[in-house]
Image (cartoon, helix red, strand yellow):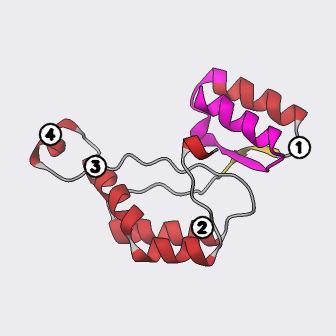
């Protein structure tokens, strides 16, 4: 499970990790995170995380992302995206298609890139962790 690896790697590297409620979506994850947090002070559970989720309003989402990044404390966070390209087929298949299109656009938005650079955030993928 990538979740367990992610937490284990943070412990191994002595990095503060912020586990948002969004990551604790099943009992197994909740129990694992609680046990690890009880053993390691660098693990913080039930955080707001980035406190951000892209909705249907793109401009509002960009503003929330910028604010969330500007207010992050040091640590390892996750931000999961499901980027897609808008097509007629996608609109039929995926009920939340607009949010996913917005996620894809956010990754390319110069405002998002600027705040990430300004705040010294290092963006990595699962394999990099």
Q: How crowded is mark 2: few (under 14 residues within 10 Å), some or many (20 or more)?
A: some
Q: Is residue 82 above or below residue 120?
A: above
> Which of the two residues, 29 or 55, is positioned nearer the viewer here?
29
Real-space Cα separation, disc 2 to disc 4, in angstroms? 33 Å
In the picture of the structure, the residue carrying the numbered disc 3 is 84
Real-space Cα separation, disc 3 to disc 1, in angstroms? 38 Å
- Report which quarter residue 55 is drawn in: bottom left
> What secondary structure is found at the residue carrying circle 2?
helix
Between marks 4 and 1 in the image, the one whose residue lies nearer the viewer: 1
State which tag comes first along the sequence, 2 or 4: 2
Real-space Cα separation, disc 2 to disc 3, in angstroms? 23 Å
In the picture of the structure, the residue carrying the numbered disc 1 is 41
Q: How crowded is mark 3: few (under 14 residues within 10 Å), some or many (20 or more)?
A: some
Residue at 67% x, 29% y is 4
In the picture of the structure, the residue carrying the numbered disc 4 is 92
In the picture of the structure, the residue carrying the numbered disc 2 is 69
Q: How crowded is mark 1: few (under 14 residues within 10 Å), some or many (20 or more)?
A: few
Is-magenta flag for residue 14? Answer: yes
Q: In the image, residue 121 lies at what x, y percent?
A: 63, 66
> Which of the two residues, 44 or 57, is positioned nearer the viewer here?
44
Left or right: residue 57 versus residue 26 is left
State which tag comes first along the sequence, 2 or 1: 1
Outermost residue toward the top in this view: 28
Real-space Cα separation, disc 4 to disc 1, in angstroms? 46 Å
Q: For the magenta stretch, what is the residue range?
A: 1-28
Q: In the image, residue 15 lies at what x, y percent?
A: 79, 49
Q: How crowded is mark 4: few (under 14 residues within 10 Å), some or many (20 or more)?
A: few
State which tag comes first along the sequence, 3 or 1: 1
Residue at 53% x, 72% y is 66
């Amino acid at each position: 499970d990538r979740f367990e690896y992610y937490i284990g790697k943070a412990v191994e590297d002595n990095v503060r990790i912020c586990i948002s409620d969004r990551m604790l979506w099943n009992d197994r994850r909740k129990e694992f995170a609680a046990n690890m947090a009880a053993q390691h002070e660098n693990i913080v559970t039930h955080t707001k995380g980035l406190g951000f989720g892209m909705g249907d309003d793109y401009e509002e989402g960009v503003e929330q992302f910028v604010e969330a990044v500007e207010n992050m404390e040091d640590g390892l966070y996750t931000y999961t995206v499901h980027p897609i390209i808008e097509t007629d087929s996608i609109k039929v298949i995926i009920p939340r298609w607009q949010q996913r299109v917005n996620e894809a656009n956010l990754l390319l938005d110069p405002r998002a890139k600027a705040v990430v650079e300004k705040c010294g955030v290092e963006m990595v993928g699962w394999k990099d962790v």
